[in-house]
Image (tube, rainbow, N blue to C red):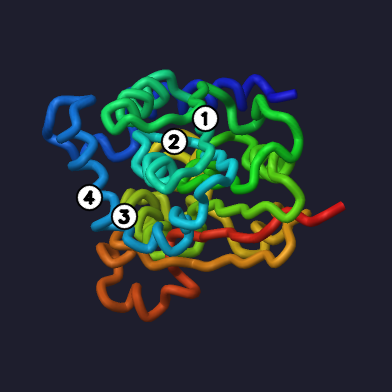
């Protein structure tokens, strides 16, 4: 059972993303309009064009796809356009409402639900693909959310999950700002991420921790990706050190059979 502290943290996470849906800061058009969603989509893929390489939207026609944490639906709508049999969950009412509006503008369909990543409301082995980009590091019990993602995936089904890296230029930059430069040199990187990276409780992981967390996944691959946010802190060095110090850790694999 979740602890009282975890429930408090989850409430803080929900409140943060209800106030500030992911990517909303990139739009100047009125919320919920076609122009609003177009601005968010354009900016997301300008900053993170590598998403397409990992998500493989075009391969999902006819497949049962679950996205955990739909945000404002920028990736979600790519699956819908590709013809996936689509389901999406989000912790926030606002996210689900806005993504539903976005799909409606294009005549697209998804089974959208407000749900907790740690307690997914689906049967075992329900989906061919489970996808989550930049979400599971926010929930208090990330390991439980990972187990849920694997549980609802059919044997042999494809998993793609991005979480933040603890050892990355972004993490080091935040630590320098909120540690030594704030006269708190003994703060840990984990503590800085917890309090200063987006919603309360955000975590970053090492590859070793992720390998332990994603047991039950065959052909496990973890790729660290250099982001524009790393480049802001380290310049061109960030791209040269991507495999070690990229901020995004993309975990891919297939649910083990049996």
Q: Are marks 2 and 1 in contact (CB under 8 Å)?
A: yes
Q: Are marks 3 and 1 in contact (CB under 8 Å)?
A: no
Q: Which residue does the numbered mark 4 point to in the structure image?
A: 43
Q: Which residue does the numbered mark 1 point to in the structure image?
A: 89
Circle 4: element type: helix
Q: Which residue does the numbered mark 2 point to in the structure image?
A: 70
Residue 15, horizontal then vertical, whole percent: 41, 22
Q: Are marks 4 and 2 in contact (CB under 8 Å)?
A: no
The residue most toward the right is 258
Q: Residue at x 64, y 36 (%)?
A: 141
Q: Which residue does the numbered mark 3 point to in the structure image?
A: 181
- Name the one closer to the observer, 249 or 97: 97
- The dot on residue 141 is none
Mark before the other along the chain sequence, 4 or 2:
4
Q: Is residue 196 visible?
A: no
State the CA–CA distance, disc 3 to disc 2: 36 Å
Mark before the other along the chain sequence, 3 or 2:
2
């Amino acid at each position: 059972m979740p602890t009282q502290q975890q429930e408090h943290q989850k409430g803080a996470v929900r409140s943060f993303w209800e106030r500030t849906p992911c990517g909303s800061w990139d739009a100047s058009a009125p919320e919920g309009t076609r122009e609003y969603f177009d601005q968010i989509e354009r900016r997301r893929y300008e900053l993170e064009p590598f998403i397409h390489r990992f998500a493989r939207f075009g391969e999902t026609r006819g497949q049962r796809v679950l996205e955990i944490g739909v945000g404002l639906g920028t990736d979600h709508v790519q699956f819908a356009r590709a013809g996936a049999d689509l389901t999406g969950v989000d912790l926030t009412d606002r996210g689900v409402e806005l993504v539903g509006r976005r799909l409606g503008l294009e005549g697209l369909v998804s089974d959208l639900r407000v749900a907790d990543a740690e307690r997914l409301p689906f049967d075992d082995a329900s989906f061919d693909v489970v996808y989550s980009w930049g979400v599971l590091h926010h929930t208090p019990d990330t390991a439980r959310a990972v187990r849920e993602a694997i549980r609802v995936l059919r044997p042999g089904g494809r998993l793609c999950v991005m979480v933040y890296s603890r050892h990355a230029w972004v993490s080091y930059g935040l630590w320098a700002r909120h540690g030594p430069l704030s006269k708190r040199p003994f703060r840990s990187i984990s503590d800085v991420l917890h309090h200063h990276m987006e919603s309360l409780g955000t975590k970053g992981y090492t590859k070793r921790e992720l390998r332990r967390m994603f047991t039950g996944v065959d052909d496990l691959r973890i790729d660290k990706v250099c982001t524009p946010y790393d480049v802001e802190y380290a310049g061109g060095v960030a791209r040269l050190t991507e495999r070690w110090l990229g901020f995004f850790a993309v975990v891919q694999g297939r649910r083990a059979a049996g």
